[in-house]
Amino acid sequence: MTSTAEEYDVIVLGAGPTGENVADRTVAAGLRTVIVEAELVGGECSYWACMPSKALLRPVAALAEARAVAGSREAVGDGRLDPAAVLARRNSFTSGWKDDGQVKWLRDTGIELVRGHGRLAGVRTVTVEAEDGSERVLTARHAVAVCTGSRPVLPAHVPGLAEAHPWTNREATGSQTVPGRLAVIGGGVVGVEMAAAWRALGSEVVLLVRGERLLPRMEPFAGELVAEGLRATGVDLRFGTEVTALKRADGSGPVTLTLDGGGTLTADEVLYATGRAPRTADVGLEQVGLKPGDWLEVDDSCTVLGVDGEWLYAAGDVNHRALLTHQGKYQARITGAAIAARAQGRPLDTSRWGAHAASADLAGAPQVVFTQPEVAAVGLTRAAAEAAGLRVKTVDHEIGSVAGASLYGDDYRGRARVIFDLDRKVLVGACLVGPGVAELLHSATVAVVGEVPIDRLWHAVPSYPTISEVWLRLLEDCRG
């Protein structure tokens, strides 16, 4: 084993969207920055999550929208998606799981890349082990940012799990073939999206949910409408069901799932979509007094708590503030600005909505679930608002009742809810469910994050005839 030592201003562990954005900001501030990555530059989102999953789901939505309108409905008839074409288009969005384009972007931006597994080795020090066993020692003059993301969680107590070779999100978004029968375990975002995608591509899908509702962190009606949508496509949805054992006899044949209560189910593949854990088990946290495998607790500037010297940062999934790519990139912009300010001897502005505070993580993190119907939400649910002690008014409206929705699709059905803070006279949350609502979400985000007074929102006139006209109906009810 050989070892070399090199000095940079900033070291970033992880070249996903979050790490790339931290590095982009620090380089723009004149700081020499290196990014360390053991897998593909571009990270989980580019190759195994956001991009391939949405590439699988977009044809599903396009076909559903065509069938929702008289005239185009007759044109598509009973036609089905072409799995080979859908998978080929998905492959194009991952660049065939090659990162040449992302590496070129790093080089063109002035960010240096070191391939290998990076671990903290002390204060502002990182060791990188390459595939050939060689080791490089990197030191940072100013900061190290941990942006290693999260990994799927598999249960430890299910007999036969390892031998069954279950899918995680990576296999679910990357499979080159359509399984005849797919069992999906978990009723969160990954579970419902992949159930929708593979059912549309021809799989017989069973969705097994331990609880009694889908999307449990969103408004209850969101999960109810998604459940209706999945059932309408032929997904076999079973609540209150837990898998107690798996058996794949020859390692490649069908999988038998034993269910609590004694029943069994046979599938060709099994997808576990049962949560995420931080990728921190082997990044050297013990070298700086932290526990390996834990989420990294940070302040609003994404500085890691419990480490002296304000040199260690953690942005993205790894800090557990908001496990969403766009929020990780937002945190990265805050982190990069904070690193640059400290390197230049400037004080941080960590006031609410300050330049060095990731306030939106807590006040208004938007999220879209790309099922049929779509779900779009930002801010607090009614339950969360009440638990926070806010005095709120909940306003619901049927989206299909506005002219734009009826033009968008025949028999349009959807629901919108806003949570109105009666004391501050601002919206603190919104949830929209229905075809095409993803593109309505940013208006809700601006209202919630901007804390726009209801009397000012009243003057933000929605265009006619669009689905956005539902905002007029909601605001009318908020004003009383």
Image: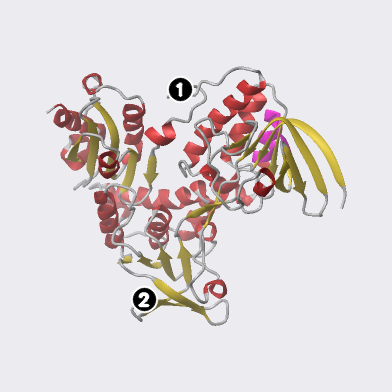
Q: Residues within 10 Å of mark 1 (few under 14, many from 20)?
A: few
Horizontal and vertical percent position of residue 231: 28, 62
The residue singled out by tag 2 in the image is: 260
Horizontal placement of 35 versus 90: left or right? right
- Label 1 amino acid? Ser
Q: Is residue 244 magenta?
A: no
State how far apart marks 2 and 1 are (Cα).
50 Å
**Residue 94 at least partly seen:** no
Q: Nearer the viewer, residue 9 or 171?
A: 9
Residue 325, relative to residue 156: is it above or below?
above
Do the residues under discs 2 and 1 have CB atoms within 8 angstroms?
A: no
Residue at 28% across, 37% down: 430
- Seen as rendered, the residue at the extreme right is 2
Q: Quadrant of residue 309?
A: top right
Residue 459, relative to residue 246: is it above or below?
above
Q: Quadrant of residue 226?
A: bottom left
Q: Nearer the viewer, residue 4 or 298?
A: 298
Can you tell which mark lies on residue 351? Answer: 1
Residue at 42% across, 32% down: 360
Q: Secondary structure at mark 2?
A: loop
Helix, strand or loop for the magenta stretch, by majority = helix
**Residue 187 at least partly seen:** yes
Residue 13, relative to residue 249: is it above or below?
above
Q: Earlier in the sequence, mark 2 or mark 1?
A: 2
Residue at 25% across, 46% down: 69
Horizontal placement of 87 versus 114: left or right? left
The quadrant in which the C terminus is found is top left
Which span of residues is magenta-colored?
A: 102-113
